[in-house]
């Protein structure tokens, strides 16, 4: 693709887009609205028949035996750690390249996150680094399907089995991804998903945990409902008022309103995944000869879900910083983002967990050069071309 010779927008030139394009965005149509209105006109607003239907359908979609809904992806992570019974002083190995909730869920339960470095090409947690960080206190692995690429592959699962560890797979980026032809959701001890508006499907806020373990599923249902052994719909069915709190739990329930929206969205998942993959293919082709940027590597045998499309800048080929490239693309109307600041570099972790720069050098180096380009299923062909044009324009200007 020919590069533009026009002045960059950040220097007073005309931007590629007059209307900014976000990096992610929900898609709500009339079917979704009708589904929510139908619940508003029903007898159930909070946890009821739509919640049960959503969970059953989601379990089938992910080929897991059980699915338990939560009020957010973070609540789902908290529930997953809590039902494993991690205690203060115990540890779980996790990745620094993720949203902080992946590690925070351990702190909620008094456990300690131990950060293992990432593979420099995929930015997924490196199994060799996991093993290097396993100690007698390690109880679990919290692995993240970063950007939408499954990480709970044979090396990770074999490592967990070797050391007798549970695997919590944070698949909040990876709904619809597959590994070895099987969908994410049924590989790990517990798998968590998010339905935030920028994810593949949305319930406004919401999350899910899938598992093949009946006992863990029952614990998850109690945990999200104050630790009570039955919910109000179950009591209504048998005409009983009686309930007992058997565990300490939280109010992390998802409403029927949200589950109706989730069901409607889930029906469109396959077409939306196809669109994301088509956009990724266009980006791949357009940037193949643009040597100053490099998309993340794809693992063999994996079908990527492309929650994010992340590129790494080759700073040796550019005469500027990542911050300047970021600002220049934003000025062109392209809503690039950065995913993520390594968790161990956040002030809270430095102050309260004793982490510091140098702990995960690959993750820290990657953070200085990564950018997330717009990626959502409602992007038009023109939106995609605008991103491609803006990237070429900015990279051409800043290349050495």
Image (cartoon, rainbow, N blue to C red):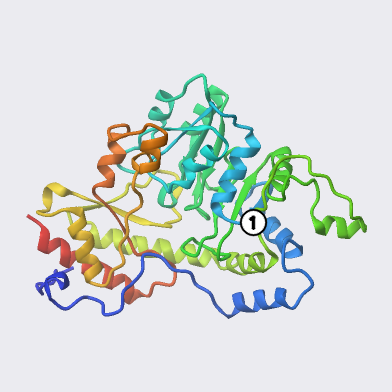
Between 163 and 44, the one nearer to me in the picture: 44
What residue occupies the far top of the structure in this picture? 136
Name the residue at 54% across, 50% down: 74
Instruction: Judge the density around disc 1: few (<14), some (14-19), many (≥20) Cα neighbours within 10 Å.
Output: many
Q: Is residue 372 left or right of residue 201?
A: left
Report which quarter residue 379 is drawn in. Answer: bottom left
Q: Position of residue 371 (x, y in %)?
A: 28, 55
Extreme residue in the right direction:
239
- The picture places residue 306, in percent across and down from the top left corner, at 42, 57
Place of residue 194 in the rendered image (x, y in percent of width and height, measured from the top left): 54, 55
Residue at (70% x, 56% y) in the render: 56
Which residue is at a point 16% across and 49% down the rendered structure image? Answer: 315
| Image height of 15 relative to 67, above or below | below
Residue 243 appearing in the image: yes
Q: Is residue 249 above or below residue 385?
A: above
| Vertical arrangement, residue 345 with respect to residue 86, above or below | below
Q: Looking at the rendering, in which quadrant would you find the C terminus?
A: bottom left
Picture mark count: 1
Residue 5: percent from left, percent from top: 9, 72
Asked whether 399 or 91 is in front, the reply is 91
Residue 165 placement, left or right of 387: right
Answer yes or no: is residue 186 visible.
no
Label 1 belongs to which residue?
Answer: 58
Q: Residue furthest front?
A: 351
Q: Secondary structure at mark 1?
A: helix
């Amino acid at each position: 693709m020919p590069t533009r010779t026009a002045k960059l927008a950040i220097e007073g030139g005309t931007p590629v887009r007059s209307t900014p394009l976000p990096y992610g965005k929900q898609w709500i149509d009339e079917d979704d609205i009708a589904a929510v209105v139908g619940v508003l006109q029903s007898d159930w607003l909070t946890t009821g028949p739509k919640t049960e239907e959503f969970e059953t359908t989601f379990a089938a979609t992910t080929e897991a035996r059980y699915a338990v809904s939560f009020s957010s992806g973070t609540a789902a992570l908290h529930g997953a750690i809590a039902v494993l019974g991690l205690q203060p002083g115990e540890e779980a190995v996790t990745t620094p390249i993720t949203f902080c909730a992946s590690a925070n869920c351990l702190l909620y339960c008094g456990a300690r996150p131990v950060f293992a470095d990432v593979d420099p090409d995929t930015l997924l947690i490196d199994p060799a680094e996991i093993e290097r960080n396993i100690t007698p206190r390690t109880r679990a692995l919290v692995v993240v399907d970063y950007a939408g690429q499954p990480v709970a592959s044979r090396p990770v699962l074999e490592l967990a089995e070797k050391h007798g560890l549970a695997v919590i797979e944070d698949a909040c980026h990876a709904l619809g991804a597959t590994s070895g032809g099987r969908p994410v959701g049924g590989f790990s001890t517990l798998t968590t998903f998010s339905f935030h508006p920028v994810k593949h499907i949305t319930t406004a806020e919401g999350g899910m945990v899938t598992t093949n373990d009946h006992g863990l599923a029952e614990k998850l249902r109690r945990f999200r409902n104050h630790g009570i052994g039955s919910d109000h719909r179950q009591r209504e069915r048998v005409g009983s008022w009686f309930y007992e709190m058997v565990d300490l739990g939280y109010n992390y329930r998802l409403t029927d309103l949200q589950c109706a929206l989730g069901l409607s969205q889930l029906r469109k998942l396959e077409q939306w995944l196809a669109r994301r993959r088509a956009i990724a293919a266009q980006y791949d082709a357009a940037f193949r000869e643009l040597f100053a940027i490099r998309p993340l590597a794809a693992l063999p045998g994996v079908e990527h879900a492309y929650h994010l499309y992340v590129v790494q800048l080759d700073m040796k080929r550019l005469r500027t910083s990542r911050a300047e490239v970021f600002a220049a693309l934003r000025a062109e109307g392209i809503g690039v983002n950065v995913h993520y600041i390594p968790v161990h570099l956040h002030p809270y972790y430095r102050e309260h967990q004793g982490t510091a720069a140098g702990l995960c050098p690959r993750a820290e180096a990657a953070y200085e050069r990564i950018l997330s380009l717009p990626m959502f299923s409602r992007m038009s062909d023109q939106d995609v071309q605008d991103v491609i044009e803006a990237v070429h324009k900015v990279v051409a200007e800043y290349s050495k």
